[in-house]
Amino acid sequence: MALVLLVLACTACATVRPGAVPAQVYDPWEEWNRRVFSFNESLDERLLRPVATAYAEFLPSVVQRGIGNFYANLADAWSAVNNLLQGKPIEAGQVAFRFGVNTVFGFGGVLDLASEMGIDRHYEDFGQTLAVWGMGPGAYLVWPILGPSTERDSVALPLNYAASPMYLFNLDLAGQFGVWSLQLVNTRASFLSAGRILDDIALDKYTFIRDAYWQRRRSLILDGEEPPSPDPSKDDPETVPEAVPPAQAAASAAFDASK
C-alpha cells in the first residue's frame, strides 16, 4: 500500500526535467560498446538476418503483420500503465481502450482495428517513466543481443521484460524462448530493407545507430516536442540537437520494437 501511495504521489507531479533529456550522447565506454556491437553485428549476419530473410519469404506479409500486431497490442497494455505512472491519464485511457478493442474484436490483437478507428498509440515503457520522474540517462550502453541502451533504460529492463509476452503467459523456459524468438525474428524481418539501406549509407555504423537510438529515446521521452530554451539568443550551436534524419528514426525504431 505504501508503494502504491508513493507511485501516486510521483505521478501527481510527474514532469520531464531538463537533466533527463540531454541532447548529447554520453559514451564513456565506447571501446567496450564497439566490441559488443561487433559481436551483435556478426550474430545478425550469420544467424538472425538469414533466418529473418527465410521467414519473410515463407510467411505471407498479412501473417507477419498479424504477428506484429499481436505483440504490439500486448505492448499497449504496458504503455497504458506507464502513461498513468507518468501522470498522463487521458493517454493511459486511450491506450487502454486501444488494447480492449483490439483484444476483444481483433482476435487478441492480431487485427489492429483501433488504428482503423483513429485511436492513436502512445508508446511508453518504464525507461521513459524513469526519465519523466527525473532520472538522467547515464552512459550509453550496448548489450549482447539486446543492443543499444542506456544506464537508465538498463535499470528499466527487468520490469519491461516482466511485462513482455514471454513472461505474461504461464510457459516453461522453452515456451518463453519460443515466444521471444518469434517476436525477434518477426521484428527483424520487418526491417530487412531498412537494414540494407543502413549498410549502404552509414560510414560508421556504430556511431550512426548510437546517435539514432539516443535521439529516438529523447524524442519519445519528450513526446516529440523540444523543451523551450530559456534564452534562445544564447543557444550554443554545439549543444542544440539537430533534427533526426528519417533513416536514423527508422533504425532506432527497430531497436525499440524488438524489446
Image: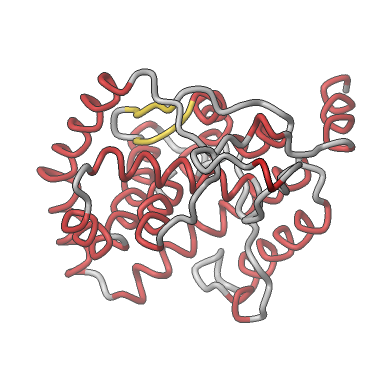
Quadrant assignment for the N terminus: top right
- Rendered position, 78 above or below 95: above
- Rendered position, 230 above or below 143: below
Q: Position of residue 233 (x, y in %)?
A: 68, 47
Residue at the (14%, 44%) spot, across then down: 47
- Rendered position, 41 above or below 223: above
Q: Position of residue 8 (x, y in %)?
A: 87, 33
**Direction from residue 105 to residue 63 in the image, left or right:** left
Quadrant assignment for the C terminus: top left
Which colour style is shown? secondary structure
Residue nearer the viewer, 239 or 13: 239
Q: How many marks?
A: 0
Q: Single out the residue that lies furthest toward the front.
A: 233
Residue nearer the viewer, 229 or 178: 229
Q: Position of residue 146 (x, y in %)?
A: 35, 35
Residue at the (65%, 58%) spot, across then down: 122
Q: Position of residue 192 (x, y in %)?
A: 24, 61
Residue at the (13%, 45%) spot, across then down: 45
Residue at the (22%, 66%) spot, across then down: 56
**Direction from residue 163 to residue 256 in the image, left or right:** left
Q: Quadrant of residue 4?
A: top right
Q: Single out the residue that lies furthest toward the left.
A: 46
Q: Quadrant of residue 130?
A: top right
**Direction from residue 96 to residue 138 in the image, left or right:** left
